[in-house]
Amino acid sequence: MARVFVTRRLPEGGTDPLLAAGHQVLGRDDDRAPSADELVAAARTADAIVCLLGDRIDGTVLRAGASGTLRVVANVAVGFDNVDIAAAADHGIVVCNTPGVLEDTTADLTFLLILAAARRAHEAASDLRAGLWDGWGINQYLGTDVFGATLGLVGYGRIGRAVARRAHGFAMSVLHHCRRATGEAGYVADLETLLRQSDIVSLHVPLTPETHHLIDAGALALMKRTAVLVNTARGPVVDEAALAGALHAGRIFAAGLDVFEHEPAVDAGLLSTPRAVLLPHIASASQATRTKMARLACAGAVAVLAGTIPPNAIETTVPGAGRAP
Ligand code: GLV
């Protein structure tokens, strides 16, 4: 029986794989984030950690784990920028994530943001609730059409592709950009061209040093004045201050954001513009998907504890993989 530290209360049934394997589940049964000290203390005595994207599993936590018996960190998220992957690999600690279960839920929410931002839904709904709507008007809340528009996907992994599938139902032309040529219709080798040509730009890249502030003031300046930017990836992919400036200046039409640079803080300039639709990082938040994510992460931990490498292990953290022999 291994000791598994689960950093928060997971959706009901989420820890089932751990319990079925007979492991001891430790940790708080609430939604409060553990402090850095709590994580270090837990890492010293745990064989596995199941964590969320708001938990920083940095070098200090992993070193503490390596001084004990920590073998696996399973992140209940597909993005894993909160885990120091290089340090984990150095300490022989395998990291798992949750690919393959949240794409459709995330793509649905991406479309919600595309539609809400393009059609000024937030602005219109806020006015209605504030009692500011005085009846139908032919010039009210004029947005931009989503059907038939050109959608530029930055990043073309599972989530980008799920968004593309939905876009075809809206008769959109879909472009995509990613580091490696896909050989598929709509591939655009350089980001600048995609930004210039798209009516809607949607971000689906992981956060890495290369993608930090990928969309900065220069990138925003390349977009059409009528364009909409949507971010369901990670906040720091966008320079938030630059985006707020572009929205206030009417440099682009609108933005739909589910993620922020310094979560849970949100840039004051974004909060003050009606042209930003802002959601609190809920792209994967359906009951079914969050349960699947929790189970997949826990199943990854169970597999590593049993001495096997599950398909949801991050390759570079698998002992012997991705490194020079
Ligand atoms: C959510 O943001 C995730 O990475 O799963």
Image (tube, rainbow, N blue to C red):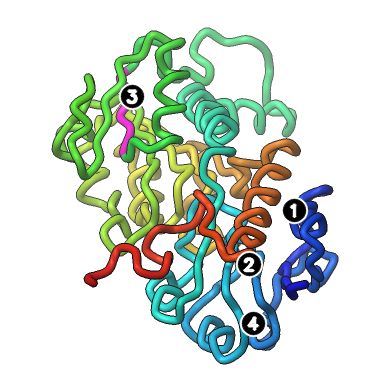
Q: Was residue 151 drawn as part of the magenta stretch in this picture? A: yes
Mark 1 nearby-residue class (10 Å; few <14, some 14–19, many ≥20): many
Q: Please, is residue 214 above or below residue 122 in the view?
A: below
Q: Residue at x 23, y 46 (%)?
A: 219
Query: In the shown orientation, is residue 64 left or right of residue 12?
Result: left
Q: Amino acid at mark 2?
A: Leu
CA–CA distance in space, label 3 to label 4:
44 Å
Q: Split into 4 quadrants, where in the image is the N terminus? A: bottom right
Residue farthest bottom in this picture: 67
Q: Marks 1 and 4, how far apart in space?
A: 20 Å
- Determine which residue is flagged by label 2: 305
Q: Which region of the structure is painted magenta?
A: 150-154
Whole-Å distance between the Cαs marked 2 and 3?
Answer: 43 Å
Percent from the top left, x then y, of residue 169? Answer: 46, 10
Q: Helix, strand or loop at disc 3?
A: strand
Residue 17 tag number: 1
Instruction: Say what amino acid the circle numbered 1 marks.
Output: Pro
Say what amino acid the circle numbered 3 marks: Leu
Using the rendered image of the protein, determine whether residue 145 is visible from the camera's viewpoint: no
Tell me if 224 is positioned left or right of 168 in this view: left
230 on left or right of 294: left
Dot 4 amino acid type: Ala
